[in-house]
Amino acid sequence: MILIAAISSDQSVYGQSLPEKKQQKAEKYKAALSQYQQEGKERKELEYLNKLAFLYWNHDFREQARSYFSRGLAINQGLGNTNGIKRTHYYLGMIWSESGRYKKALGSFEKGLQISKRLSQKSSQLSGLINIAQTHQLAGDYQSSNRYALQGLSLAKELDKLKPIRTCYGILSENHKKLGHSEKSIKYFDLFSSIDQHLKKEKISEIRKHSQSEISEARSEKQQTQQELTEEINKRKMTEDSLQRVDSISRKRQMQLTMQELENKKIQAQLKLEKTVRNSLIIGFLLITGFSLLLYRFYKQKKQANVLLERQNQQINQQKIQIQQQKDRLQLQNTKLNDSLNYAETIQQAILPAKNELEQMFESFILYKPKDIVSGDFYWYTRVEGTNAHPSKAFLAAVDCTGHGVPGAFMSMIGNRIFNEIIGEKKIYDPAHILYHMNRTTIDALQQERTDNPDGMDVCLISMENTDKQKKKIRFAGAKRPLFYYRQNEPTLSKIKGDRYSIGGINKNKTKKTFQTHELTLQKGDMMYLTTDGLFDQVNDHRKRFSTQRFIQVMYDNLHLDMKTQKKKLEEKLETFTGVSEQRDDITVVAVKIL
């Protein structure tokens, strides 16, 4: 139900008529429509109004089509058929747009879109958004077209529908071209072209498979036909030979042959009877002898099998003993390993900040879900007391180390130590400078300039200091991690992107990575969210990601609740979304509200 972008101007159809066969069909529909109107059967009347509307619309008689759809709309409204009302508004919108009457088209599309939203029909909402974006584009309102196209793009990505995604990219590319935004136009055209090539490759693959199937079927039919033709030729040849032989023998000779043949059959029957009796006696003797030999062989085999079975039982019992011993050893090793991991978990938990430390500066909640017993994620907090020259500062970070389990836990210990060294010992307080020194220290600690070690960390780091009793100055720097924040009375959560570098890792030779410090001012009641990527990358039973957008929506919907309840709502949403799928990575969310 998506509007086609190439729309010609409305041509006059008055004085013209449908083709003869279509006109006959239209007369039948009108007769049925009149009958159902008289009988008061509104649903049947609605069915034939739609048939007539589509018949005229398909032959570019738009005014007649619009008239029948309008009558159908009134019946749908009377019946309370919400889906029918929505579809009819979309049809009328397309007809108005084809006629170049874009204002009326937008009105109809908007009505259909609102109904789709009330019914929570996301596919129908997507159709409406794309129709409105294309209509604004045709009307020359490229800014409005971009706004609806971006909404449609977000919904198409959520529904994982490639064709609508391609359509939205195409609209955005054309709009920015018209607006003179060359870079954005090229960017969206590249995205459009990439998806378009992918869809074309899938189509070509389907056509190729279908063609190969048809070729194989044709070859098979050809071989079968050739075989049948050969058999038919042989049959005809045999028939012709038989006819020639019959014609060459006289009637008299044929009678002699017949009598001789009967005599021969009599002699053969006698011989066959004697042979059958003789063979029966021989077969009976052989069967008795063979059965006796078979019984003796079975006896020998059973005796050998019993001996073999006894040996196998002894071997199996010995193997059971060995397996049990091995299980006992493995159980002991597993117990020792779990004891070690549990102790490692205790150590790792001990280095994490205590909640009462955070509560001096923030009201908070922490969602910390390691994938294994120990985690590659950690969060870090410290407070630096102020002086006369410098106010006191608080530092908070959420860190995602390479891997999870034991390897990730080792990296988290290294990361924790580096934070303490840079801020606590070297007194470096600017977030960007902290990440710069953290990158250099990680590369040196893991000797990454001389080895193939790829380990690293993604970091979201903030510092906070008081500007007055109400306002707080926040400084943020990120290594591949963003900061989410909320100011009171704003319509949604905002996001500041981090820099594209990790700490250490695969970019180990880029020791001169630079990071940027972002500043913003928040006040009492405002909130910040520091996260690793484990939450957003978690998939459900349908392989769909939890996604940043879903996280933003969940938190925004629950901002009015206290922090403990916010955490509970996020955990419930994550559990419902994940279903029976396995947790893919460590998950950390640190949420703080400024006191």
Image (spheres, rainbow, N blue to C red):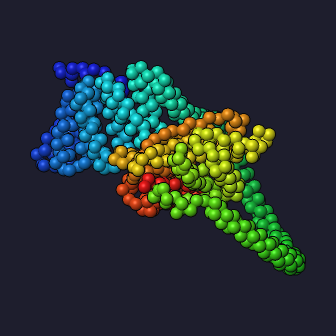
Relative horizontal placement of residue 224, taking residue 548 as reference (left or right): right
Name which residue lies at 72% across and 52% down.
261
Q: Nearer the viewer, residue 457 or 315?
A: 457
Quarter of the figure with the C terminus? bottom left
Query: Relative to 149, is 426 above or below?
Result: below
Residue 260 in picture, x, y percent from top left: 73, 51
Left or right position of 322 against 517: right
**x 21%, y 24%: residue:** 17
Q: Can residue 121 be seen in this view?
A: no
Q: Position of residue 553 (x, y in %)?
A: 41, 49
Residue at the image position 43 percent from the left and 43 percent from the top:
521
Q: Is residue 365 above or below residue 129?
A: below
Give percent across and percent down for residue 36.
Answer: 15, 45
Answer with the quarter of the image where residue 87 lies. top left
Left or right: where 408 falls relative to 472:
right
Quarter occupied by residue 201: top right
Tally the marks: 0
Inspect this view and state whether residue 467 appears. Answer: yes
Percent x, y of residue 399: 60, 50
Q: Which of 122 and 428 is in front in this view?
A: 428
**Image quarter (top left, top right, bottom left or bottom right) of the N terminus:** top left
- Work out whether residue 109 or residue 140 is closer to the camera in this orientation and state it: 140
Quarter holding residue 409: bottom right
- In this view, the residue in front, 403 or 580, is 403
